[in-house]
Structure formats: structure tokens, C-alpha cells
């Protein structure tokens, strides 16, 4: 349980730093976003004793009728049974978030930092992601 709380604390800290909004205002809207994410480590993720850095490629598709910004994104590494092994916040730097609009998905690459051991990471077989939409 303590390990889970430590992971959540780390992810919140990284997420809040990466998603700083300055003096702007963003409103959460109910626009469905489809997130496709996959690891792109070449040759291996870089791991320390309690965390790993994992490269990823992401595509966020706006399923609504208006341009939105994807924020509050989370990536999950799943084991062979579809159970989450690791979860990490995806930050898009300073600004409103990843810009999407219907018919023009956001495509990007980045690095996740997750509190996970290399042994736990080795059990990840696929990735999934989710994001919330803001205007």
C-alpha cells in the first residue's frame, strides 16, 4: 500500500510540474478523446533502483465536434492479463495541453518516469492511456 501511495505522490508531483497553466483558465468539457500509446524504447528503458524512464509514442484523437486540449493524461502498462502494472502521468509541458481537433489527431513522443522496478516493467505487455478534454 505504501508503494502505491509513493507512486501516486510522485506522479502527482511530476504531473503538476509538467502541466502548469500560468494565469490561464481551462474548462473541462465532455468531449471523448481516444488515446493510443505504445512504448518505443531503444534498446531498453533506463531504470534505477525504484523508477524507470520509458519512451512512448502517443496519438490522441478528438471524437467531438470542436477543437480541445488533452490534459490530465494517464498511461498504464498492462500485464498479459490486462491488469495494470504501472501507471504514470503524461505531461505536455507548459501550456494548455495537447491540441486536438476533429480529423486532426495530436501525435507526439515523450518519456514517462514511473516508480517501478525493471522486473515489474518487464511484465508489461501493452499500454493504454486516457486523457480529459479542456477548452
Image (spheres, rainbow, N blue to C red):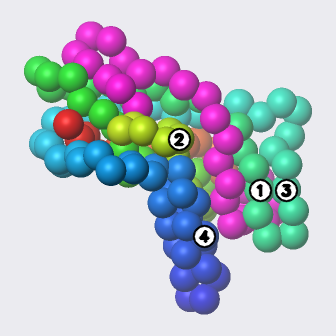
Q: Earlier in the sequence, mark 1 or mark 3?
A: 3
Residue 31, percent across and down?
16, 36
Residue at the image point whose x is 53% and y is 73% from the top:
8
Above or below for 117 versus 4: above
- Provide the residue span drawn in magenta: 98-123
User: Which mark is first along the chain, 2 or 1?
Assistant: 1
Q: Which one is earlier in the sequence, the residue at label 3 or at label 4?
A: 4
Q: Nearer the viewer, mark 1 or mark 2?
A: 2
Q: CA distance from mark 4 to mark 1?
A: 12 Å
Q: CA distance from mark 3 to mark 4?
A: 16 Å
SS at badge 4: helix
User: Alpha-carbon neighbours of circle 4 within 10 Å: few (<14), some, or many (≥20)?
Assistant: some
Q: Is residue 15 visible?
A: yes
- Alpha carbon separation for disc pair 3 and 2: 23 Å
In the rendered structure, find residue 47 and report the number of the disc placed on it. 3
Q: Is 41 drawn above or below residue 79 in the view shown?
A: above
The residue identified by callout 4 is: 10
The residue sitting at the front extreme is 23
The front one of 123 and 134 is 134
Give the CA distance from mark 1 to mark 2: 20 Å
The residue nearer to you, when weighing 99 against 75, is: 99
Q: Position of residue 111 (x, y in %)?
A: 67, 41
**Secondary element at tag 1:** strand
Amino acid at each position: 500500500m505504501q508503494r502505491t501511495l509513493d507512486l501516486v505522490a510522485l506522479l502527482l508531483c511530476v504531473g503538476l510540474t509538467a502541466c502548469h497553466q500560468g494565469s490561464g483558465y481551462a474548462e473541462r468539457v465532455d468531449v471523448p478523446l481516444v488515446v493510443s500509446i505504445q512504448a518505443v524504447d531503444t534498446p531498453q528503458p533506463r531504470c534505477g533502483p525504484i523508477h524507470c524512464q520509458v519512451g512512448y509514442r502517443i496519438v490522441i484523437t478528438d471524437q467531438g465536434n470542436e477543437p480541445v486540449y488533452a490534459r490530465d493524461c494517464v498511461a498504464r502498462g498492462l500485464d498479459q492479463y490486462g491488469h495494470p502494472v504501472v501507471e504514470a502521468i503524461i505531461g505536455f509541458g507548459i501550456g494548455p495541453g495537447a491540441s486536438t481537433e476533429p480529423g486532426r489527431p495530436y501525435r507526439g513522443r515523450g518519456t514517462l518516469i514511473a516508480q517501478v522496478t525493471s522486473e515489474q516493467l518487464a511484465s508489461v505487455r501493452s499500454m493504454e492511456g486516457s486523457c480529459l478534454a479542456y477548452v
